[in-house]
Image (cartoon, grey):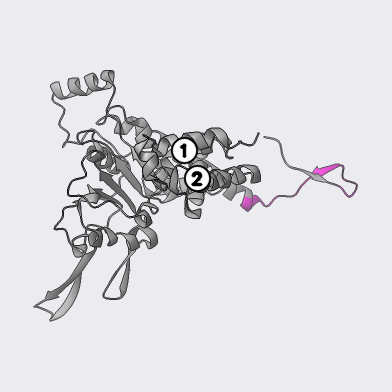
């Protein structure tokens, strides 16, 4: 490794610049922790693949959300292993996991917790709800009324729960992974735009390919039990996530790439196919996910290709199609694809 070279008064090369040994050692230790974290988080895909076949891209998106302290909306037809994937990820990360089945009769207190009167002490005692965990699976979130959906807003944005005016902090990390069915809307309550905007990513969980489905069926034929996760071992944990987050914050963003992110988001507000474009929060979300993807790819700077790779999962749920565009068969991903092809990327 070349040592830094100082400049003399005339601007020429002089003696090596003095460096603080303690600062240099601290920087080297941070670099070592970041490399260890990247290796561990990259290994997550192989670990999750022990139980879930063919969802590497979705697992990568979940890891990016954890690095950015963001929440994820998973959309896929029933039977595509959404719940199993989240359970396996929690085990591979050694994180606490809870699942809530969202139903029409679910109340806000069933999610956040409530005050319970204790006869022995003659006082009210707070009983924590399932939201007090690291990884919360909100299964079929659109099947519960808006009042219960809204109970997650404070938890998702401020990472705390207020009951009777008293705020209670949630654990760190805290990530909501919500699922919804894209083909069955009867008896559902679509999430309002304000809540959709609080999800960092919307990931589409595809049906596996033919080869992947054959491999899955063969696993079940040889005795695979989805409820038994004993084969999955923790390959990372909160320490690796914290080191990864610190490293992501150091990823360089060139001014031209930052302008490209803004131009993409502003273009959605001017699209004739969209009734609602991406908010400024969406622009900061795209910046965050692009930096996380760049770091996971082994780089300390963001490229326009990083932005393009994360644009659709980061922005697809933040736009709203016009009714006439929907009638013509337009989709959010299709509109975003057109915008990506028309907005010039920096070179």
Residue 18, numbered label: none
Residue 80 horizontal/vertical position (percent): 23, 33
Residue holding disc 2: 268
In this view, the residue in front, 135 or 260, is: 260
Asked if 139 appears above or below 36 in the picture, the reply is: below
Q: Residue furthest left?
A: 119
- Residue plotted at (16% across, 80% down): 123
Tell me the magenta residue range: 8-23
Residue holding disc 1: 336
Q: Secondary structure at mark 2?
A: helix
Relative to residue 6, is residue 132 drawn left or right? Answer: left
Relative to residue 8, is residue 113 drawn left or right? Answer: left
Residue 188 horizontal/vertical position (percent): 21, 50
In this view, the residue in front, 74 or 181, is: 181
**Magenta span has 85?**
no
Residue 237 horizontal/vertical position (percent): 36, 45
Q: Residue furthest right?
A: 10
* Residue 177 seen in the figure: yes
* Residue 236 seen in the figure: no
- Residue plotted at (45% across, 37% down): 335
């Amino acid at each position: 490794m070349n040592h830094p070279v100082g400049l003399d008064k005339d601007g020429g090369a002089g003696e090596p610049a003095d460096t603080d040994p303690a600062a240099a050692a601290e920087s080297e230790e941070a670099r070592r922790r970041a490399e260890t974290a990247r290796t561990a988080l990259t290994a997550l895909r192989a670990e999750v693949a022990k139980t879930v076949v063919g969802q590497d891209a979705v697992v990568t998106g979940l890891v990016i959300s954890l690095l950015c302290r963001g929440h994820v909306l998973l959309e896929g037809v029933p039977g595509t292993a959404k719940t199993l994937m989240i359970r396996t990820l929690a085990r591979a990360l050694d994180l606490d996991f809870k699942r809530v089945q969202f139903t029409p009769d679910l109340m806000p207190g069933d999610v956040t917790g409530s005050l319970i009167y204790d006869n022995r002490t003659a006082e009210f005692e707070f009983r924590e709800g399932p939201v007090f965990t690291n990884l919360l699976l909100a299964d079929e979130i659109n099947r519960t009324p808006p009042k219960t959906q809204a109970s997650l807003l404070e938890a998702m944005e401020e990472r705390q729960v207020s009951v009777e005016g008293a705020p209670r902090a949630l654990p760190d990390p805290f990530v909501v992974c919500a699922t919804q069915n894209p083909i069955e809307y009867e008896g559902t309550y679509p999430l309002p735009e304000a809540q959709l905007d609080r999800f960092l990513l919307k990931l589409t969980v595809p049906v596996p390919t033919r080869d992947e489905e054959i491999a899955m069926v063969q696993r079940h034929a040889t005795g695979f039990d989805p409820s038994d996760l004993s084969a999955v071992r923790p390959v990372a944990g909160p320490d690796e996530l914290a080191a990864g987050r610190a490293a992501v914050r150091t990823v360089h963003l060139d001014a031209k790439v930052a302008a490209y992110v803004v131009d993409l988001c502003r273009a959605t507000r001017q699209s004739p196919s969209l009734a609602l474009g991406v908010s400024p929060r969406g622009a900061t979300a795209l910046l965050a996910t692009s930096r996380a993807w760049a770091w996971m790819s082994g780089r300390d700077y963001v490229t326009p290709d990083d932005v393009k790779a994360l644009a659709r999962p980061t922005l697809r749920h933040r736009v709203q199609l016009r009714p006439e565009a929907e009638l013509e068969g337009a989709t959010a991903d299709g509109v975003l694809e057109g915008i990506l092809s028309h907005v010039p990327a920096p070179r």
